[in-house]
Amino acid sequence: MYNDKTIVCKDCGTEFIFTVAEQEFYAEKGFTNEPQRCKPCRNARKNAAGGSSRPEKVLYDVICAECGRPTQVPFQPKNDRPVYCRDCFANNR
């Protein structure tokens, strides 16, 4: 069904092989477009973008419900539940 395909990289112009295994992987994941860049160019592009598509963690400023010190937590606090600093949380475990 699939055959190896030779594709010219959009960035550097070198030819690379889009293997049968890669084509099967793309089909399994539902990807409809073939890759446009060779592996080194894809990696360079990924590293230039910070290496990850994850957004930065958002930290929320809160006051510890036990000791009253300001702290930050990685989740949006709700008013119906107490939020603790790292030390108080560890002590309450």
Image (tube, rainbow, N blue to C red):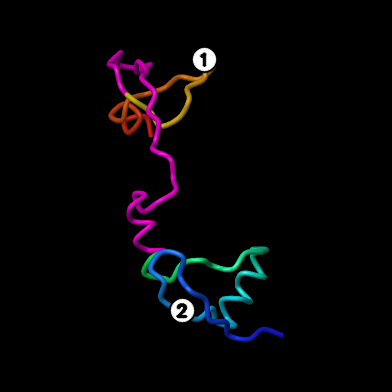
Mark 1 against mark 2, which lies toward the viewer?
2
Q: Is residue 1 magenta?
A: no
Span highlighted in magenta in the image: 42-71
Q: Is residue 28 left or right of residue 83?
A: right
Task: Please tell me whether mark 2 sits on a helix, a strand or a loop.
Answer: strand
Circle 1 sits on which residue? 79
Q: Position of residue 31 (x, y in %)?
A: 64, 63
Amino acid type of the residue tagged 2 in the rendering = Phe
Classify residue 20 by image quadrant: bottom right
Number of other residues with Cα within 10 Å of mark 2, as a class: few under 14, some 14 to 19, many 20 or more: some
The CA distance from mark 1 to mark 2 is 55 Å
Task: Please tell me whether mark 1 sits on a helix, a strand or a loop.
Answer: loop
Q: Position of residue 9 (x, y in %)?
A: 45, 70
The residue drawn where x is 36% and y is 54% is 51
Q: Is residue 46 magenta?
A: yes
Q: Is residue 32 left or right of residue 19?
A: right
Q: Is residue 63 left or right of residue 76?
A: left
Question: Looking at the rendering, in which quadrant would you find the N terminus?
Answer: bottom right
Number of other residues with Cα within 10 Å of mark 1, as a class: few under 14, some 14 to 19, many 20 or more: few
Circle 2 sits on which residue? 16
